[in-house]
């Protein structure tokens, strides 16, 4: 978000009758950005909201080209994944991290996220589903249940568990995973700052090639 929008956008949020949260959503602004502008206004007035665009029009923590490619490739391979699933996959399988909001903005900007259209007309015959009532546990599809349980325990990241799988908690991997993600986030931000601002590279070698995605998992499209 460029600073040249800060003055008008901040005033729009303050004057909106929708409330700050709804106004931020409609303006596609982050709450952290709004809070930063608010602090600047209270500290220096409207002078603090003037155009102070970064050099060369680049934000220090914006995604690098290879990071954008990796996110879009993950979304293309697994179109049923949510933005949280993609963010968790990147943190565990790629060599960088990206927040859910960053993933969402990129997918929305590139057309991967489509607006939902509400359908309010009464359901016709084509929308009616015949439900199958299972009489006994033996009638259930044992193979299908096994696939679902395996996906739920091994693949699904639970927000209440810190965005890790139930297996990770059960086998004691959770703390190690969270620490590795935290360390990777620090390295990711340092690399973006260095590349986006032109800061000289450190002495240690830094890989620039794009890390290929892991083979597509059989539970990517659960059926």
Image (cartoon, helix red, strand yellow):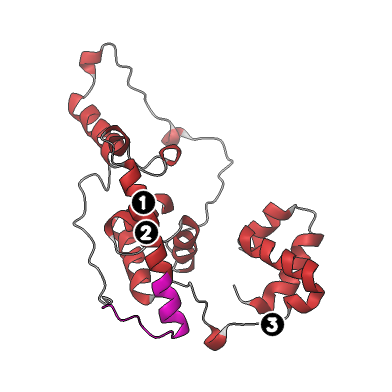
Location of residue 124 with respect to 201 vertically, above or below = above
Q: Quadrant of the N terminus?
A: bottom right
Q: Which residue is more in the foreground, 170 or 163?
A: 170
Examine the rendering and report whether any part of residue 98 can be seen.
yes
Q: Label 2, secondary structure: give it.
A: helix
Decide which of 40, 34 is in the foreground and name it.
40
What stretch of residues is rendered in magenta? 190-205
The picture places residue 47, in percent across and down from the top left corner, at: 78, 79
Circles 1 and 2, Cβ within 8 Å, touching? The answer is yes
Mark closest to the chain's N terminus, 3 or 2: 3
Task: Establish if 88 lies above or below 203.
Answer: above
The CA distance from mark 1 to mark 2 is: 6 Å
Query: In the rendered image, which quarter is residue 89 located in?
Result: bottom left
Q: Is residue 223 visible?
A: no
Rendering quarter of residue 203 = bottom left
Q: Nearer the viewer, mark 3 or mark 2?
A: 2
Relative to 126, say whether 21 is above or below. Answer: below
> Do tag 3 and tag 2 residues touch (Cβ < 8 Å)?
no
Q: Earlier in the sequence, mark 1 or mark 3?
A: 3
Mark seen at residue 183 = 2
Give the Cα separation between the discs numbered 1 and 3. Answer: 38 Å
Q: Nearer the viewer, residue 13 or 133?
A: 13
Q: Position of residue 124 (x, y in %)?
A: 49, 35
Q: What residue do we see at 36% from left, 51% from top? A: 179
> Which residue is tagged 3?
51
Identify the secondary structure beneath mark 3. loop
What residue is disc 1 on? 179
Secondary element at tag 1:
helix
Task: Using a 10 Å C-alpha cutoff, classify the residue at mark 1 as few (fewer than 14 neighbours), some (14 to 19) or many (20 or more).
Answer: few
């Amino acid at each position: 978000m460029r600073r040249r929008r800060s003055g008008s956008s901040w005033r729009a949020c303050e004057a909106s009758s929708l409330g700050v949260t709804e106004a931020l959503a409609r303006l596609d602004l982050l709450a952290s950005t709004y809070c930063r502008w608010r602090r600047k206004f209270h500290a220096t007035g409207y002078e603090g909201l003037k155009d102070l665009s970064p050099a060369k029009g680049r934000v220090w923590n914006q995604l690098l080209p290879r990071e954008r490619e990796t996110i879009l490739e993950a979304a293309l391979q697994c179109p049923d994944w949510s933005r949280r699933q993609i963010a968790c996959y990147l943190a565990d399988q790629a060599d960088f991290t990206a927040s859910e909001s960053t993933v969402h903005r990129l997918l929305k900007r590139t057309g991967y996220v489509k607006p939902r259209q509400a359908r309010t007309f009464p359901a016709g015959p084509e929308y009616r589903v015949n439900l199958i009532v299972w009489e006994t546990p033996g009638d259930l599809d044992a193979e299908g249940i096994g696939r679902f349980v395996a996906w739920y325990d091994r693949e699904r990241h639970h927000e209440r568990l810190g965005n890790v799988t139930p297996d990770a908690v059960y086998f004691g991997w959770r703390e190690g995973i969270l620490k590795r993600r935290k360390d990777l986030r620090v390295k990711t931000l340092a690399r973006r700052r260095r590349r986006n601002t032109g800061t000289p590279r450190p002495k240690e070698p830094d890989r620039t090639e794009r890390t290929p995605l892991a083979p597509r998992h059989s539970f990517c499209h659960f059926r």
